Image (cartoon, grey):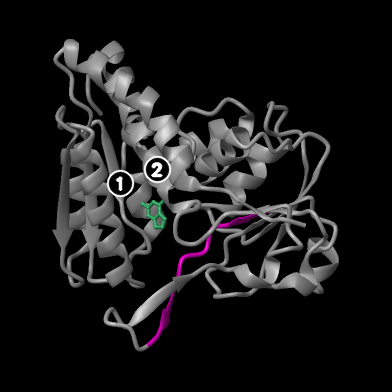
Amino acid sequence: MNTKILDGIEVAKFLKKNINEQILSLKKRNLKPGLAAILIGSDPASQVYVKNKEKVFSKHNCLTKTFKFPDDSSEEEIIDFIKKLNNDDAFHGILVQLPLPKRFNTKKILHSVSAHKDVDGFHPFNLGLLFEGNPNFIPCTPNGILEILKYYNIKTTSKNIVIIGRSNIVGKPMFSLLSQNFEFGNATVTLCHSKTENISSYTKNADILIVAVGLPNMVDATMLKKGVHIIDVGINRVNDNSKKGYHLVGDVNFNSAMGIANSITPVPGGVGPLTITMLLHNTVKACELFSTRGSTG
Ligand code: GUN
């Protein structure tokens, strides 16, 4: 079988045409979508992700500002700052880059972001709407995965979809989306995690396999059904002797899946570009909703 590469950069380009039109139309009404990113601590991967978000937002003529806080900041300080941003009309979206340093109460901090500005879709109000089947802001990575499936017309109705990883960022919202009565939903979805016994017995039945665990090359050919579509969400750094000192690999052993899978997202260049694109999409949407609501917070 000739395994097709699902090119996330191509899908992102396609979606950005529409997003650009929305940004232009907002500009005509003197509105500029704005994103405030909060970065706490010095996690190297988080720093790279936030920089990439800034680049994409600037390129699309959106306002973007990163507010950096040292590791030893207090929770109150961060929450007070978020409350100020909730009332700042320049920023339609607020993002708290995760993971936070261990001593922070992540939920408490995420809950302090106004649901109107929750472009990550992590606030319980937005997660509730999503689980109800009436989503407002959809978390960016699961939404990006849906866009990949739509672009390549990988049907989900009545399929067996296995997700590995039960995070609030990817696994749980993805489970909800794919099991809803939506065009790219209606699947029978199995959510596997670190306590699942004999994961292969599930993955071997998967028509679509979504892996989001953060373990380099965790899935290999022995766990796959022939003809499976693979969405690899992992972005793992593996140390090497290159100038950078590392290279990126996914959660799926890419070479091992070749010839068995019908299609697969590469790492990098698969899901990653979609996550930022959907963040742009959500921020533009937040700006549009703000313009009709006419107030902050
Ligand atoms: N860390 C990894 N993925 C994400 C994401 O989608 N949003 C935020 N805020 N942090 C992340």
In the rendered image of this protein, does residue 116 appear above or below residue 22?
Answer: below
Query: Which is nearer the eye, 158 or 245?
Result: 245
State the image quarter where residue 201 is shown. bottom right
As drawn, the residue found furthest toward the bottom would be 241
In the rendered image of this protein, does residue 148 appear above or below residue 21?
Answer: below
Distance, label 2 to label 1, CA atoms, is 6 Å
State the image quarter where residue 16 is shown. top left
Q: Is mark 2 within 8 Å of ligand 1?
A: yes
Q: Position of residue 85 (x, y in %)?
A: 18, 39
Q: Position of residue 165 (x, y in %)?
A: 62, 62
Query: Quick check: is 236 in the magenta stretch?
Result: yes
Which residue position holds label 2? 120
Q: Is mark 1 within 8 Å of ligand 1?
A: yes
Q: Residues within 10 Å of mark 1 (few under 14, many from 20)?
A: many
Q: Quadrant of the N terminus?
A: bottom right
As drawn, the residue found furthest toward the front would be 2
The magenta-colored residue range is 230-240
Query: Quick check: is 238 in the magenta stretch?
Result: yes
Residue at the location (66% across, 46% down)? Answer: 175
Q: Position of residue 66 (x, y in %)?
A: 17, 51
State yes or no: discs 2 and 1 in contact (Cβ < 8 Å).
yes
Q: Mark yes or no: residue 11 visible.
A: yes
Instruction: Give the amino acid type for the residue marked by disc 1 in the picture.
Output: Leu
Q: Mark yes or no: residue 199 visible.
A: no
Instruction: Give the amino acid type for the residue marked by disc 2 in the picture.
Output: Asp
Residue at the location (54% across, 30% down)? Answer: 129
